[in-house]
Image: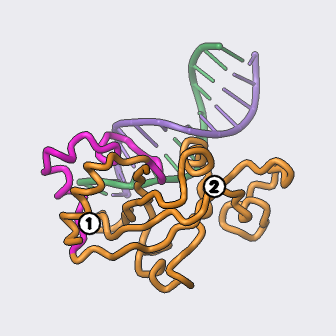
Chain colours: A orange, B green, C purple
Amino acid sequence: MKYWLFKSEPNCFSYDDLLKCKNQTEPWDGVRNYQARNFMRDEMRVGDLGIFYHSNCKPPHAIGLLEIVSAGRPDPTQFDPFSEHPDLTADPKNPRWFLVDVRARGKFRRPVSLSEMREIPDLSDMKLLSRGNRLSVMPIEKKHFELLKKLGGL
DNA sequence: GCCAACGTTGGC
DNA sequence: GCCAACGTTGGC
């Protein structure tokens, strides 16, 4: 089993928004980065777990757990000219962008801020903390997942 | 295939 | 609002 970190801007889609979705499940659509796409298309498996991270807010923080509940599948929003990230050059017979469906697996009792993470030596080699990292979906080591979960009070 | 220009991300 | 980092684009 693998572990992942999913970034989202809370004013766009927050953990509470996920909790309000049917079955607390939602497609993680709109990703338009090849590396992130490859993770979703090729490496995620049903049952993998993830951390939900709120970016571009004050302070940025990890806020809860999620579970991957579908394999990678084509992201329908690429073909929708009215979606936020249409890609009209994508061929429906050979989709370019993929998503997975994620389900909420528990909100943290307390958020774990980015600055707090930076102060914890055991988290120092997390990809999230590396300079200039802009990936919205990235792998995370099990030990980091477990520690974040604990810091979040779960 | 190189690389300059440009756009985006996202912490600060 | 600034800017570092980095991905993408497109001319050559």
Q: Which residue is mark 2?
A: A72
Q: Which residues are drawn in magenta?
A: A110-138
Query: How far from the left and from the top, in percent, is residue A21?
Result: 53, 83
Q: Is residue A145 left or right of residue A79?
A: left
Q: Amino acid at mark 2?
A: Gly
Which quadrant of the figure has residue A131?
A: top left
Query: How far from the left and from the top, in percent, is residue A124?
Result: 21, 43
Query: How far from the left and from the top, in percent, is residue A79?
Result: 79, 61
Q: Amino acid at mark 1?
A: Pro
- The residue located at (80%, 50%) in the rendering is A90
Q: Is residue A98 left or right of residue A135?
A: right
Q: Which residue is mark 1?
A: A59
Which quadrant of the figure has residue A82?
A: bottom right
Q: Quadrant of the C terminus of chain A?
A: bottom left
Q: Is residue A39 left or right of residue A11?
A: right
- The residue located at (51%, 62%) in the rendering is A68
For disc 1, the chain is: A
Label drawn at residue A82: none
